[in-house]
Image (spheres, helix red, strand yellow):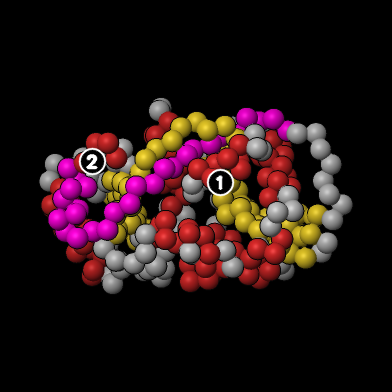
Amino acid sequence: MNLLQNFLDLDIAYLDTFTKRLNTSWGYIFYNENQPKYYDANHAHLHEAPENPKAVIEEVIHFYNEKNITPRFYLYNLEKLSLFVKELDAYKFGFEELVSPIQIWNKEIKDRKRSNLVTIEKVTEENFNEALEIECSIKEFGGREVREKAFAEEFKHPAFTHYLLRCDGIACATACLFEHRDQVRMESVATIEEFRGKGLIGELIYFLQAEVKKSGKEDLWVFPINEKIEKVYAKYGFNTAGKFVTGHAFLGGKSIKEIQES
């Protein structure tokens, strides 16, 4: 199985935990009417050139318009979809290209001592609200509008384990592990603004790597949102297995780059 297919299988399994999937002859339509502004939960997925681009575009527009959700596409294998992208332009879709690195942990555990100010615990009913407030404060995650419902759904799902880091007793960082068969994906790694630059992300990552090692799972993956974050993970033993240029087409709202940079 090639890298793209491994990535797509893990990504689709991840999406299936918080949104509904409609299988089509050309790809997938993901939708969650309870979270209409959550892009990952509401998009058409395409990685092969369809025979009839116009029919696909009109099907997607009609599907989402009926649900009062902004029509959008996530496009993979972009080099094969140039004609489809041209057709999207005719329908007045906004479009952006994104570099999507894929990194895999080298399985090396660093011999190091954790700061005595840092404690890390699983998210439970007791500390749920503390973790929720951290996630809702991260603009790159979409803020409260997106994460409040999404975090609650993930917390209830058995494939996710969320973690909360405290520094000197103060809840200030979160991360989670998503498990699918013998694969693990690290997600939602974040620190509130006033605690950034103190090495807390490293504390979390090293802890999660040890958890994965103990679990006996085969691989630990991370899909950084851009090349800047890719360089951060490289410091913690994540090797870049590949990079894909993906496309995001949208018929309204902000681009992903605008959200990340706001």
Query: What residue is at 68 percent from the left and 68 percent from the top?
Result: 130
Residue 13 in view in this figure: yes
- Is 200 within the magenta? no
In the visual, does 63 lie left or right of 140? left
Q: Residues within 10 Å of mark 2 (few under 14, many from 20)?
A: some
Horizontal and vertical percent position of residue 201: 68, 50
The kind of residue on which mark 1 rests is Ile
Whichever of labels 2 and 1 marks the residue nearer the N terminus, that label is 2
Q: Tell me where the magenta segment starts and ends, as one range.
A: 83-109
Horizontal and vertical percent position of residue 173: 68, 59
Query: What residue is at 26 percent from the left and 63 percent from the top?
Result: 251
**Do the residues under discs 2 and 1 have CB atoms within 8 angstroms?**
no
In the visual, does 165 lie left or right of 76? right
Q: In this rendering, is residue 163 above or below 51?
A: below
Marker disc for residue 154 = none
Horizontal and vertical percent position of residue 181: 53, 39
